[in-house]
Amino acid sequence: MKANCWYGAEDIRVEEVPEPKILNPRDAIVKVTATAICGSDLHIYDGYIPGMEKGDILGHEFMGEIVEVGDEVKNLKPGDRVVVPFTIACGSCFFCQRELFSCCENSNPNAALAEELWGQSPSGLFGYSHLLGGFAGGQAEYARVPFADVGPIKVDGDLTDEQVLFLSDIFPTGYMAAENCNIQAGDTIAVWGCGPVGQFSIRSAYLLGAERVIAIDRFPERLQLAREKGKAETINYEEADVFDTLKEMTGGRGPDACIDAVGMEAHSHGFVGMYDKVKQVMMSETGRPIALRQAIMSCRKGGTVSVPGVYGGLLDKIPFGAIVNKALTLRSGQTHMQRYLRPLLERIQKGEIDPSYIITHRLPLEEAARGYKIFRDKEEDCIKVVLKPGMKSNGATTPAN
Amino acid sequence: MEAKAPVAGASATEKGILAMAGSSFTQHWQGTSVKQLAKGLGCFSVALGCAEIFAPDWLAEVVGIRSRPLLIGALGLRELTSGLGILGQDRPTGWMWSRVVGDAIDLALLEAAREERDSDGDRVVGALAAVAGVTVIDLLCALLLRRETPEDTAHVVQTITIGRSPEELFNFWRDFENLPQVMRNLESVRQIDDRRSHWVARGPGGRTLQWEAKITDERPNEYISWRSRSGAFPHSGTVRFVPAPGERGTIVRVELDYEPPGGSLGRTVARLFGQAPEQKIQLDLYRMKQILETGVVMTTEGQPAGRSSSTSSVYDWGTTRG
């Protein structure tokens, strides 16, 4: 089968590899019908994620049709259409019982490696380095899904792939980011980053009762999407000072909660941006926490800073004094996917949201490398790339709806 | 398992020196007193080093040689380093050897200086005698420190919390023939009778290790203690099953005493490669938790990849392959 494999920074290729097999009785094999490139895949693409090996199959946002199930998988059968959550969870350990699925104790076979880095290991993830299990990812024609009796959600009815695909990661991730803000009536939420997770954080904040959402980015097309589809007010940080503008927009108090949907590769101008770039290149910090610093400094006293953005290791110059002295709450985590699949599918079914609005590019799986590049470089106003195995290449990008 | 006779790794020469020093002497210099002797020698090093650096002319006169401030200063720096090293460590075996080496250098230099025209022969001979005396003390101290190093047995503890009752876990473990499912290094375990069992494991370099183990003590649903009786991998161990607070399953605690192949150095090397027993036990316990809580042992072996091997050797061999 064809699969998108990683061979080094900015070196990914669609190669012919063997088809996956059932390895455990709780596995299933999915024939992938749609898969997406996630912003966090770009951290791998840029070479910032440790524990990658040449030949690893990428991708953790995918869905498709069940073609084979192990003996212990009773709730699915061949032919079922499923969306696969990116966190692999056993459903029975201490953490799964508490719905902290991304902390599953039993799904990362390389837990000892992750413990070296973080003290304890999170759950295994698809296609996201050997620290997180080394599981082959879903940017392929077929994928093996461990604990298939717990993870995948069956999707019946006439919803299209594109409407439900983002249940695999970014819609629940944006939703959990907003849920972590503990939104109260009248709250103003600020969201750093208007990429896919930022867009869903904006929508979710409103779904959860926010009064106002203020979105921060620098790309006009992303700010426009946040305004038009997200009903957010926007700040272009190349044109205005974020802290001052937020303060002014919120009557001097600051947003009630701040969401960092940017993560480790934040961009900034001037000295601060240069400082973090140099430190990251010299490996004296593993992320550039520019958005996170701004979120902490801007947040109102007693407010919440919610971090769906990915950070892998050590950060520099985090204003922890602001967290203490402003009595802030800091919340983060890989998304506890299995907790959100059912309720968010219901919201899609009820028409409260159609997540396909963020898609700008649809490409055949074979053009994955081009998809990564235009997504990373924001070429062609790219916001979200969906890869479709078997789709005919016409040499041109399918235009947005 | 009680500590074995010391000086397992000592050469015949070392044993000879210790014997020459007399058993009563070596017995006297045990434990803390060896460390105190080392500290004393460390202080002496620091004092001598300072004198060499700050008062080379005076020192040269005392010893009876022509003053060479640069050379004597360099020797002082060496002396100071050794001294601070000794004072900075609880068991400064290596630093004590650095003093022995330094003594040898000093002896050689003094011997060379004795022949020089402008040396005071009598004083140099006196200095030679003094350094030789200190050398003997340094050598003894280094050997005694080494002998004290507890490198013969290793004690390891690993724990895990599993969401099953002590009874289920005790029964799983007590049926030793279950263990190869979760302990990757074990090939088979065969019960000989109720207390004795025969174990076969893969050792370093693909060697097959075999031993017989006997249960020395047990209490149902609480603990099992065992000891190897013959064969490779001499060890003893205890596994305890304690209910976790708040009905959160059972805490499994494994303690193992074993003789690391290759002594402490072998143990360090094994650790670097993720092959030390404590690391293997931890992974074994993870797999035991997986099979008891989920019914399967999580694996990626056999999955596709854009390379010749299905799993990645660098990251997986120490973990998934045990």
Image (tube, coloured by chain):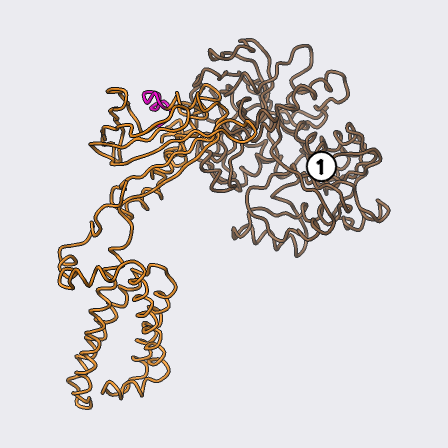
Q: Main secondary structure of the magenta part?
A: helix
Residue A79 in the image, given as x and y percentages of width and height? 56, 8
Which residue sits at x=62%, y=39%?
Answer: A377
Specify whether residue A207 is in view.
Answer: yes
Q: Inspect this view and state whether residue A58 appears.
A: no
Quarter residue B213 falls in: top left
Relative to B88, residue A117 above or below: above
Residue drawn 57% across the image and 20% down it: A151
Q: Are there few (<14), some (14-19), or many (20+) residues within 10 Å of tag 1?
A: many
- The percent coordinates of residue A224 (x first, y second) are 77, 35
Percent position of residue A130, x then y: 46, 34
Is residue A247 magenta-colored? no
- From the viewer's side, name the closer residue of B175 and B292: B175
Q: Which residues are magenta?
A: B174-183
* The hue in which chain B appears in the rendered picture of the protein: orange
Q: Nearer the viewer, residue A116 or A167?
A: A116
Q: Position of residue A17 (x, y in %)?
A: 43, 23
Question: Which residue is drawn at the image coordinates 42% and 21% (left, top)?
Answer: A18
Which residue lies at the image location 21% right of the left edge and 81% below the top edge?
Answer: B127
Q: Numbered disc 1: what chain?
A: A
Horizontal side of A215 relative to B97 (left or right) equals right
The amino acid marked with disc number 1 is Cys
Name the element at disc 1: loop
Picture layout, residue B75 above or below residue A148:
below
Image quadrant for the C terminus of chain B?
top left
Give the labeled residue for mark 1: A194
Q: Specify the quadrant that holds the N terminus of chain B.
A: top left
Q: Disc count in the image?
A: 1
In which image quadrant can residue B307 be found?
top left
Give the colour of chain A.
Answer: brown
The residue closer to the viewer here, A79 or A362, is A79
B208 to the left or right of A94? left
